[in-house]
Structures are given as C-alpha cells and as structure tokens.
Image: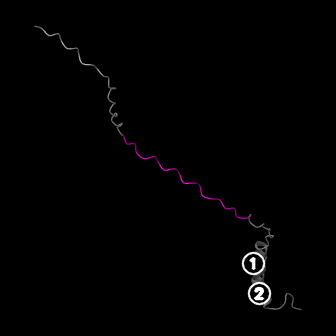
Amino acid sequence: MITGGGPGWGRLRPHLAVLALAVFVVASVNADPYIYASPPPPYVYKSPPPPSPSPPPPYEYKSPPPPSPSPPPPYVYKSPPPPSPLKV
C-alpha cells in the first residue's frame, strides 16, 4: 500500500508548504480591521489678514511763513505849532 499520495507527492510537498505559508502571511497582513474614518469637518473660510500699514512718508522740514506785515499805527492828528511871534 502506498501512503502519502503517490510517488510525485514527495516532490510537491515542500512547494505546497511554502505556498501555504505565503498565503497565510498575505492573509494575516491584509487582515487589518477596517477603521471607520469620519468625514472631515466642513471647510470654514478664513479671510486673509489686513495688509500691514505703510510706513509714514519721510519727514520734510518746512520753514514757517514770514510774519505778516503789521498794520500801520492809527492816524493821530497833530495841529501845527503856533506861529512864532514876529520880531521887529
């Protein structure tokens, strides 16, 4: 009586063992449980920051305006001097 499946079975047995081991390894690597990932939160628009203020212009010295001419003094009437006495 022939046990073990026949004369070719002895040569095929190592190949089947390697194949079974490979199938087991691939099945165990791919057997990760599915993890449900919730959808991302809705997109919230954020406006860009306001532009930074521009620097002030460079300082330029401006001399003060000349003083305005003062008004003339008020007119005051002066009577002429009395005539000098005539000398004879």
Scheme of colours in the image:
one colour
Residue located 69% across and 62% down the image: 44
Q: What secondary structure is marked by label 1? A: helix
Cα–Cα gap, marks 2 and 1 = 15 Å
Is the C-beta separation of discs 2 and 1 under 8 Å?
Answer: no
Q: Quadrant of residue 38?
A: bottom right
Q: How crowded is mark 1: few (under 14 residues within 10 Å), some or many (20 or more)?
A: few
Per the rendering, the mark at residue 12 is 2
For the C terminus, give its image quadrant: top left
Q: How crowded is mark 2: few (under 14 residues within 10 Å), some or many (20 or more)?
A: few
Q: What stretch is highlighted in magenta?
A: 42-61
Is 53 placed left or right of 24 in the picture?
Answer: left
Is 55 placed left or right of 77 in the picture?
Answer: right
For the N terminus, give its image quadrant: bottom right
Q: What residue type is labelled 2?
A: Leu
Residue 50 highlighted magenta (yes or no): yes
Residue at image mark 1: 22
From the viewer's side, name the closer residue of 73 and 79: 79
Between disc 2 and disc 1, the foreground one is 1
Q: What residue type is labelled 1?
A: Ala
Residue located 75% across and 83% down the image: 15
Residue farthest toward the top in the current orientation of the protein: 88
Q: Quadrant of residue 32?
A: bottom right
Residue located 83% across and 91% down the image: 6
Percent x, y of residue 17: 78, 80
Residue farthest toward the front in the current orientation of the protein: 88
Percent x, y of residue 24: 79, 76
Residue 45 highlighted magenta (yes or no): yes
